[in-house]
Image: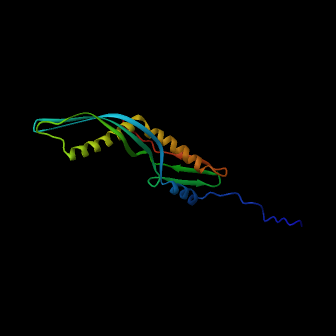
Amino acid sequence: MDGVFDFGGANPPVITQATVVERLREVAKLVSFEMTLRDVVTDEQTQLRSTKRALLVVTARVSAGIDLGKGTNVEIDSVAKRIIVSLPPSQVMSVDVLDVTTYDERAGLWNPFRTGDRDEIQRRVRVQMMSAAASSGILKHADENAAQVLTDLLTRDGYTVEILRPPVVRAR
């Protein structure tokens, strides 16, 4: 003997559901697409027949992705070396307002701007930016990128990965 011991050779790697679930938990929320948007936001409120208006141009960074903790399912076929991952649809995960420029602000005679009005305008800005992002196709891009990232993350040791997503009808 020349000092080499053979203990039956190396066992082929086996990927378990626990391994895949652990890898997904490490990611938790997968931001898979970001975009910067610019949109015009108008606000008009009438009270006591007096109208106040604001015209703003808003720039925001919108992030979309998948919350892997909600609705994600993993199935592993060790014989076929296949991992099937069912994902929930993408969602807008954050809206970061980068810049707001006020081009016009007119208070009504009996309807002045108050601090609460500006807070409400900020909430409307965020909602409008989420809506603009959704109609821009950000969720479709986020779905595609998430599938690619997870495929790259989980394709190991001869396993193939199939990503399943429920058909989702998105508002246009």
Q: Residue at x 21, y 44 (%)?
A: 117
Q: Hey, which residue is sitting farthest right in the picture?
A: 1
Picture quarter with the N terminus: bottom right
Q: Residue at x 38, y 44 (%)?
A: 96
In this orientation, which residue lies closer to the viewer: 45 or 165?
45
Q: Does residue 170 appear to the left or right of 4 in the view shown?
A: left
Q: Position of residue 146 (x, y in %)?
A: 51, 45
Q: Does residue 50 appear to the left or right of 130 in the view shown?
A: left
Q: Position of residue 35 (x, y in %)?
A: 44, 38
In this orientation, which residue lies closer to the viewer: 144 or 84?
144
Count of marks overlaid on the render: 0
Picture quarter with the C terminus: top left
In this orientation, which residue lies closer to the viewer: 29 or 107?
107
* Colour scheme of the picture: rainbow
Q: Position of residue 153 (x, y in %)?
A: 58, 49
Q: Position of residue 9 (x, y in %)?
A: 77, 61
- Location of residue 51 by image quarter: top left
- Location of residue 92 by image quarter: top left
Q: Residue at x 86, y 67 (%)?
A: 3
